[in-house]
Image (cartoon, helix red, strand yellow):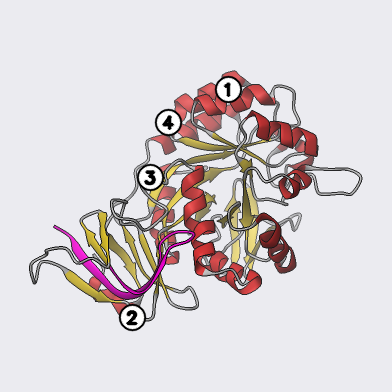
């Protein structure tokens, strides 16, 4: 039996609840109690002193393409192993594997392979798949291969769902096409969250998609029709209508610090989901790498396509996104937990088991110092990553 007392830290349990110098009791894979000692016998549990540190629920990244040179579009289990092993050092305990646009045949192959992939024993939890396309707008394709961008096809959608064997969790689409409503309904039927992105849609088309059941916006601002005072776009819809979650890549490259601060003020922590949009260059040294068939370069904390100079995803971890939001917007720790833990869990319909610190939920825990450097990460009640200070507790 695995038993831990995490003692003396400041607990930020969800968007509203916090405790100072608190005690957190964990038994096996479950949060047992907060500040209420169970009837454990002396010597039957391990006490870890976390005085002066912050305890968050494990963070959830719903938009990541790879890390450590691995891309989810090739070598599914190897990519899952690499990413699961990499992101726990950032305080991430669960994530969704994001795919760029592929041919339908290749997409089905990758979906099937990822649908069969398993979370490694010592890594972050692999929750499912995010298909970033293919039913998007060519005008806002960004790095996507234009040859494989196409109009909505419900038959293809159903084939994707079957190939992934229930693991297809999120799909980015453009509501600018006729037939988008039917696509949204197919997503709802198959428990796929439909997110507006890579889209030339008008504000009216985006709002209609929300009416029909779309869940929000993929990497808000990036690769979508902008907010204009006489030509309302997707961004207009996101800023003026209170429905739907908005992903934000808080790396200050995809979205500047001034706009991040403005967005926090308008959207609030209730709608923002912090994501990394990280890709294979994450956690690698500066230099060239391949991303979805394109030669890219990592340099000075940025990633870009060699031939065009376009942004090629980010190279940050979720703890860096949290740090940036804290520094830029002065958001509090409960609000950071809402954006990095609560909201992604709610989007994925997983809030009953993860996304907050509450008795009965999974013991997915991240421990940070005041700079949001990760001290300890626990997944399913097991300590899978620690800073050198807590090395003796790693399992």
Rounded to the nearest angstrom, the CA distance separating label 4 from label 1 is: 15 Å
Front label number (1 vs 2) = 2
Rounded to the nearest angstrom, the CA distance separating label 3 from label 2 is: 29 Å
| Corner quadrant of residue 308 | bottom right
In the rendered view, tell whether residue 121 sits above or below residue 168. below
Image quadrant for the N terminus?
Answer: bottom left
| Corner quadrant of residue 281 | bottom right
Front label number (4 vs 2) = 2
Q: Residue at x 87, y 49 (%)?
A: 228
Residue 317 appearing in the image: no
> Which residue does the numbered mark 4 point to in the structure image?
166
Callout 1 touching callout 2 (CB < 8 Å): no
Q: Which of the marked residues, 3 or 2, is nearer the chain's N terminus?
A: 2
Rounded to the nearest angstrom, the CA distance separating label 1 from label 2 is: 53 Å
Q: Which of the marked residues, 4 or 3, is nearer the chain's N terminus?
A: 4
> Which residue does the numbered mark 2 point to in the structure image?
51
- Residue 393 in picture, x, y percent from top left: 24, 71
Callout 3 touching callout 2 (CB < 8 Å): no
- Residue 345 in picture, x, y percent from top left: 46, 48
Name the secondary structure under disc 3: loop
> Which residue does the numbered mark 3 point to in the structure image?
352
Residue 242 appearing in the image: yes
Q: Is residue 54 magenta?
A: no
**Count of picture labels:** 4
Q: Which of the marked residues, 1 or 2, is nearer the chain's N terminus?
A: 2
> Which residue does the numbered mark 1 point to in the structure image?
156
- In the image, which residues are magenta? 1-23
């Amino acid at each position: 039996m695995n038993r831990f007392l995490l003692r003396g830290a400041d607990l930020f349990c969800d968007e509203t609840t916090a405790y100072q110098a608190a005690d957190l009791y964990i038994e096996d894979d479950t949060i047992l109690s907060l500040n209420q000692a169970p009837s454990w016998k002396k010597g039957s549990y391990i006490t870890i002193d976390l005085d002066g540190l912050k305890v968050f629920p494990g963070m959830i990244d719903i938009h990541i393409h790879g890390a450590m040179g691995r891309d989810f579009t090739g070598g599914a289990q190897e990519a899952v192993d690499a990413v699961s092993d990499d992101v726990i050092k950032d305080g991430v305990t669960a994530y969704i594997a994001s795919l760029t646009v592929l041919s339908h045949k290749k997409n089905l192959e990758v979906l099937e392979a990822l649908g069969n992939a398993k979370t490694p024993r010592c890594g972050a939890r692999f929750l499912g798949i995010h298909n970033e396309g293919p039913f998007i707008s060519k005008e806002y394709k960004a790095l996507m291969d234009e040859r494989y961008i196409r109009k909505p096809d419900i038959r293809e959608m159903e084939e994707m769902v079957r190939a992934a064997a229930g693991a297809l969790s999120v799909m980015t689409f453009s509501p600018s096409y006729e037939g988008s409503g039917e696509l949204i309904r197919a997503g709802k039927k198959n428990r796929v969250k439909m997110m507006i992105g890579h889209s030339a849609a008008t504000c009216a088309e985006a709002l209609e998609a929300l009416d029909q059941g779309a869940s929000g916006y993929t990497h808000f601002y990036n690769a979508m029709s902008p907010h204009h005072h006489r030509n309302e776009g997707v961004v207009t819809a996101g800023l003026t209508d209170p429905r739907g979650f908005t992903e934000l890549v808080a790396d200050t490259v995809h979205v500047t610090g001034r706009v991040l601060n403005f967005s926090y003020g308008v959207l609030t922590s209730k709608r923002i989901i912090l994501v990394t949009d990280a890709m294979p260059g994450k956690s690698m040294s500066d230099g060239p790498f391949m991303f979805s068939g394109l030669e890219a370069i990592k340099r000075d904390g940025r990633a870009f396509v060699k031939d065009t100079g376009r942004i090629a995803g980010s190279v940050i971890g979720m703890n860096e996104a949290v740090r940036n939001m804290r520094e830029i917007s002065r958001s509090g720790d409960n609000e950071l937990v809402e954006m990095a833990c609560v909201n992604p869990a709610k989007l994925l319909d997983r809030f009953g088991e993860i996304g907050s610190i509450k008795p009965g939920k999974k013991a997915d825990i991240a421990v940070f110092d005041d700079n949001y450097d990760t001290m300890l990460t626990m997944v399913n009640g097991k300590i899978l990553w620690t800073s050198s200070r807590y090395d003796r507790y790693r399992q």
